[in-house]
């Protein structure tokens, strides 16, 4: 099935490429004027019938120019607009200087500080845009903190000031916006790490540009449409062999539950047969909570069991037996999903790293940041400082497709394409959640989905299941990983064929 077109996500370099292509047109489009009008219209919608007083923070760059343009429109619409300018008028770009002149000619004043004891119905953040790569300092940091303390909702222009548009890192003071209006396309930093907490509700205004036509984005946003790529429709003449066979390899002593969670997730998201290879000598012979699972010694899964997908890692442990089993999976010509101790073993042994990189069959990795750091030979802080770069580095180094878990899971393919997941909530930060994801992804791949589609859909489905549960009051606090399984099954069966 053809993969659908995703909502574009562009890093800063991509946005600059789109802008350059647009400005090469004759005549060049008035992007700052369009952006300012879009901000003013969004502000008017947020203010509604009752709000009349607006604070506009204008910074030293083009983001400040957008803010001036918005302020002019709001003043013309008879709002009470206070503009605080934190910059040097003599150093503004041509368009931003023209926007400031419009504000002055409209009778507007420039304030040096936010008026004390004044009640604002809305604040518009135009201090810094997508070019900022460090924490605001001095006066700028003070303005950010003062704006956050106003008690008024904040509308951020393009990105909240203080947030890195590429990485989602907020290294210091940062605007906490209730709403963000971003231009041309979504930015990675709005969708991952600190971005979702700082940006609030995000809307995109293309300001008259077609991003796909001008400079196609290499990134996309995962949403419910990703399920359309899955072979979910089943004819009446169907048997379990048509739905694939998944083998879960893990369940060492004390970690049997991890393998069972993965197995249950695989079974209930559609796999025809699910085998669970348990390393623990005292593992149960049957899962009485899900007796359809077929529990075996793990060696049997590489000998006399026909398998479509190996999922290696849930509760695997890191002893010699675990290392040997992982090596067998990597030498197979089947799709392999690696998580947890499967990843830790790869990080620890060069022979496994080489085996992984040399595979011809698809391998899907689902590390959390600490596991990614071990695989890259660095630390968790470095991974989190640029999640997109880390995911792409893993995909390139190990010849695989990677889902770097976390707030705004980043998926990177071997060919350089990448996606950010838009579903999920903090309820996923619980023990066993990753095992459930492993089982879902393995199940979708076993049913015949392209491995990349299986990973994309599995990541979205995993997060959407948590969202559905939270919507019913089951989480995010106290959401147990096992509860995700039935919720994911419900979503799959609601998906149109």
Image (cartoon, helix red, strand yellow):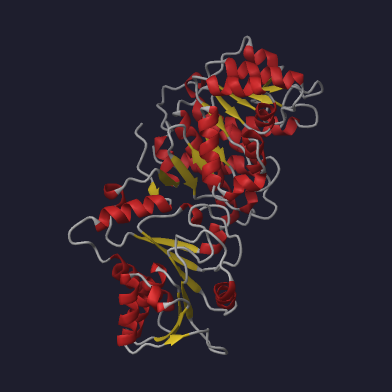
- Horizontal side of residue 193 vs 84, given as left or right: right
- Residue at image location 54% in from the left, 69% down from the top: 175
Quadrant occupied by the N terminus: top left
x%, y% of residue 281?
81, 20
Considering depth in this image, is 486 or 236 the residue closer to the camera?
Answer: 486
Residue appearing at x 56%, y 14% in the figure: 306
**Left or right of residue 315, residue 420 in this image:** left
Q: In the shown orientation, is residue 266 left or right of residue 123?
A: right
In the rendered view, tell whether residue 289 sits above or below residue 138.
Answer: above
Quadrant in which the C terminus appears: top left
Above or below — where is 420 with respect to 31? above
Picture quadrant where residue 227 is located = top left
Q: Residue furthest top?
A: 304
Residue 178 shows up from this direction: yes
In the displayed structure, 152 sits above or below 318; it is: below
As drawn, is 43 to the left or to the right of 29? right
Query: Residue 268 lies in what quarter of the image?
Result: top right
Residue 46 in the image: x percent, y percent? 43, 74
162 and 438: which one is in front? 162
Determine the residue located farthest toward the front in the rendered image. Answer: 90
Percent position of residue 61, x then y = 41, 69
Residue 346: image location, x then y, percent:
65, 27
Figure quadrant of residue 97 = bottom left
């Amino acid at each position: 099935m053809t993969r659908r077109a995703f909502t574009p996500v562009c890093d800063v370099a991509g946005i600059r490429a789109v802008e350059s292509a647009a400005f090469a047109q004759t005549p060049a489009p008035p992007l700052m004027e369009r952006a300012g009008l879009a901000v003013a219209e969004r502000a008017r919608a947020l203010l509604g019938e009752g709000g009349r007083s607006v604070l506009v923070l204008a910074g030293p760059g083009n983001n400040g120019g957008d803010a001036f343009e918005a302020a002019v429109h709001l003043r013309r619409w008879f709002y009470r607009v206070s503009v605080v300018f934190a910059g040097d008028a003599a150093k503004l770009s041509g368009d931003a200087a023209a926007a400031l002149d419009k504000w002055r000619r409209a009778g507007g004043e420039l304030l040096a500080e936010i008026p004390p004891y004044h009640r604002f119905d809305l604040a518009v953040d135009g201090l810094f845009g997508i070019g900022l790569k460090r924490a605001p300092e001095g006066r700028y940091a003070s303005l950010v903190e003062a704006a956050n303390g106003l008690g008024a909702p904040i509308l951020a222009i393009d990105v909240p000031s203080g947030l890195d548009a590429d990485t989602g890192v907020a290294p210091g003071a940062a605007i906490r916006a209730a709403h963000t209006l971003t231009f041309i396309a979504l930015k990675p930093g709005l969708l991952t790490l600190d971005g979702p907490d700082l940006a609030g509700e995000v809307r995109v205004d293309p300001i008259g540009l077609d991003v796909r036509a001008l400079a196609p984005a290499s990134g996309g946003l995962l949403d419910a449409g990703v399920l359309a790529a899955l072979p979910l429709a089943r004819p009446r003449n169907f048997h379990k062999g048509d739905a694939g066979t998944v083998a879960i390899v893990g369940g060492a002593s004390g970690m049997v539950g991890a393998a069972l969670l993965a197995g249950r997730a695989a079974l209930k998201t559609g796999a025809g047969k699910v085998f669970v290879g348990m390393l623990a000598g005292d593992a149960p012979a049957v899962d009485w909570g899900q007796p359809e699972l077929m529990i075996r010694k793990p060696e049997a899964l590489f000998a006399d069991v026909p398998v479509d997908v190996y999922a290696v890692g849930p509760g695997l442990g890191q002893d010699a037996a675990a290392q040997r089993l992982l090596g067998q999976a990597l030498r197979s010509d089947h799709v392999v999903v690696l998580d947890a101790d499967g990843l830790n073993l790869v990080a620890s042994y060069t022979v496994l790293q080489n085996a992984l990189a040399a595979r011809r069959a698809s391998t899907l990795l689902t590390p959390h940041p600490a596991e990614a750091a071990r695989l890259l030979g660095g630390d968790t802080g470095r991974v989190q400082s640029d999640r997109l770069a880390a995911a792409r580095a893993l995909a390139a180094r190990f010849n695989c497709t990677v889902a770097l878990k976390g707030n705004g899971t980043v998926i990177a393919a071997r060919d350089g394409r990448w996606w950010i997941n838009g579903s999920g909530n903090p309820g996923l930060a619980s023990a066993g959640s990753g095992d459930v994801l492993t089982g879902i992804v393995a199940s979708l791949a076993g049913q015949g989905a392209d491995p990349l589609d299986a990973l994309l859909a599995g990541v979205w489905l995993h997060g959407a299941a948590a969202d559905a549960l939270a919507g019913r009051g089951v989480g995010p606090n106290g959401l147990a990983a096992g509860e995700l399984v039935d919720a994911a099954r419900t979503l799959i069966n609601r998906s149109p064929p």
